[in-house]
Amino acid sequence: MSDVAATAPSHDGFAHKALKTSGVIWFLAATVGQWLFVYYILMTHGRATLSGNYSEWDDVGLISGYVDGDLIANLLFISHVLLAVIMIVGGTLQLSPPVRKRFPTLHRWTGRVFLVIALFLAIGGYYMTWARGVRLSDIGAMGVSFNAHLIVFFSALTFYYAYKRQIDTHRRWAMRLFIVAHGVWFFRISLMGWYLINQGPVGSTRQLDGPADLVISFACYLVPLAMLELYQRAVDGHSTRFKWAMTVGVLLGTVAMSIGIFAALMMMWLPHI
Ligand code: HEM
């Protein structure tokens, strides 16, 4: 056997197929949860905006929401939430293999739209948080702020490698961007999952600056990011044991994520729809 063949990743074994299948299962579960978030946004902020009852934005218990007479604040808020819908729907289409393979032009455009909106949400969200004071506490806003930095950084790298035509590296940064661009969604499902498992807000405060809030506000996207790196290494590598370990890891992660989605649906989204 040549050296190349000896070190080449094994892509046709059972372990490899199981690993890839676990990735698909994770993606399908995440898609359901992200579309439920979209449904919540449309049924609350979307409906209130279409009917012209802007003050109803606040009915979900926002920090700021509608500000009477402040056109900039209101435009910033509503563009933020409605563009979030386009980004989330576009993101799931972007990673869906049938769409990627059958409609490459659509794939390229949804990718560009995803990247630009993710940047807009990160910068606009950062501005609302720190320049307009829409935050519950300084410490509580650290996690989402670091998330915003990662979105900007990963967007730049995703764009750079596409421009350089280094498609494999571009794809890897795009996947990382997908994870951090859903940081606020991960935060919601993680926090609600935590409340559900503990039957209450253990270590969490109304200002979201308790120990559990702090850990969750960073871990909610850093743990999925670490999982993605390990998954990618397992896919690329040729260790069967590592592939099996990651298959189990991804499936357990999917179970945890599904509990969080259920909790967010029951405690955060459905009560407002
Ligand atoms: C990039 C992905 C993002 C998405 C999909 C997203 C989505 C949303 C949604 C749906 C809301 C409405 C909240 C609700 O109804 O419960 C919202 C509000 C808000 N977001 Fe984002 N967001 C993102 C990023 C960010 C970032 C990075 C920041 C800050 C650094 C941020 C700051 C805010 C603020 C300040 C509000 C208003 C909260 C309030 O008044 O209570 N967002 N976002």
Image (spheres, grey):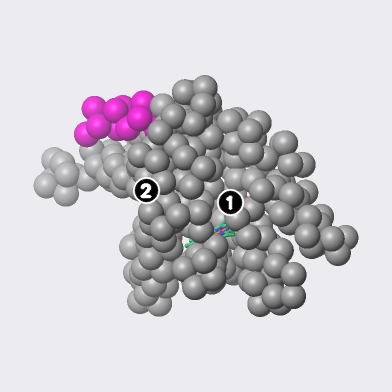
Residue 140 numbered mark, or none: none
Badge 1 density bin: few <14, some 14–19, many ≥20, Cα 10 Å = many
Q: Is residue 266 left or right of residue 69?
A: left
Q: What residue is pinned by disc 1?
A: 92
Out of 253 and 130, give the one closest to the viewer.
130
From the top left corner, tell me how far across and down residue 132 is, in percent.
54, 70
Q: Which residue occupies the foreground of this view, 122 or 169?
A: 122
Q: Is residue 195 at all visible to an observer of this figure? A: yes
Q: Earlier in the sequence, mark 2 or mark 1?
A: 1
Question: Which of the two discs, 2 and 1, sits closer to the camera?
Answer: 2
Question: Nearest the camera: 98 or 60?
Answer: 60
**Residue at image point 44% right, 29% down:** 202
Q: Quadrant of the N terminus?
A: top left
Q: Is residue 261 above or below residue 53?
A: above
Query: What x and y, as percent, mark residue 247?
Result: 36, 30
What span is in magenta?
Answer: 239-250
Q: Residue at x 64, y 38 (%)?
A: 268
**Chief SS of the magenta region:** helix
Ligand 1 image position (quadrant): bottom right
Please, is residue 73 above or below residue 90 in the view? below
Instruction: Name the kind of residue labelled 2 in the image.
Output: Phe
Relative horizontal placement of residue 134, taking residue 224 as reference (left or right): right
Kindly indicate whether the residue at mark 1 contacts the one at mark 2 (C-beta within 8 angstroms): no
Residue 138 image position (x, y, % from top left): 41, 58
**Whole-number angstrom distance, CA of label 2 to CA of label 1:** 23 Å
Looking at the rendered structure, the number of numbered marks drawn on it comes to: 2
Secondary structure beneath dot 1 equals helix
Q: Which residue is mark 2?
A: 218
| Residue 159 point in image, percent of width and height | 42, 72
